Amino acid sequence: MYQRILVPVDGSDTAKRGLQEAIKLSKALGGQMRLVHIVDDSALALNPETGIAAAPLVEDFAEGGKEILMEARTMAAAQGVDAETVLHENFTGRVADLIVDEARKWRADLIVMGTHASGGIRHAVMGSDAEAVLHGAEVPVLLVRVPGTK
């Protein structure tokens, strides 16, 4: 069934909830799991005022991303699931596109990610990474809603 499960993580409670479900699936199915974190530097790249001063911020974001991946990997290992990790930097484009691209390159069978299932103005203007992944992915996407969100 699902032997290659891709799990985007960003350190949020929402992403951790998606990770928990992915761990259960991976453990039950004996599949592989890949954790991916996207360091989204696009706001810095688009702001000419940041200039050279952006370099230390990019490094800080990357270090933070590595920590997020290690925490997620530790959570999986605590449940007996081995997970590999991948860190990507995004200077242009949408995070969702990089997630879909990673799923394609790694030949994932399933993408599991948490979602707030938000709506309203923010969703209409910004869109949702989860929704964009859902529409762009060539494989099934399991969206895990955080309890208590609308």
Image (cartoon, grey):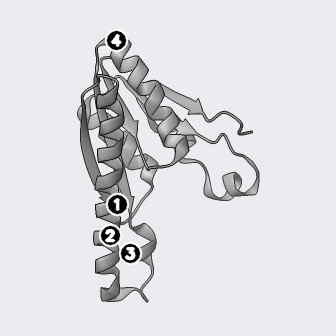
Choose mark 4 or mark 1, whichever is in front: 1
CA gap, disc 2 and disc 3: 15 Å
Residue at image location 37% in from the left, 11% down from the top: 28
Q: Find disc 3 in the rendering and name its residue.
A: 45
Q: Are marks 4 and 3 in contact (CB under 8 Å)?
A: no
CA gap, disc 1 and disc 3: 18 Å
Instruction: Tell me the kind of residue under disc 4.
Output: Leu
Foreground residue among 104 and 145: 145
CA gap, disc 2 and disc 1: 6 Å
Q: Are marks 2 and 1 in contact (CB under 8 Å)?
A: yes
CA gap, disc 4 and disc 3: 41 Å
**Residue 67 appears in which quarter of the rendering?**
bottom left
Q: Which numbered circle lies on residue 64?
A: 1
Q: Which numbered circle lies on residue 60?
A: 2
| Comes first in the chain, label 4 or label 2 | 4
Instruction: Tell me the kind of residue under disc 2.
Output: Asp
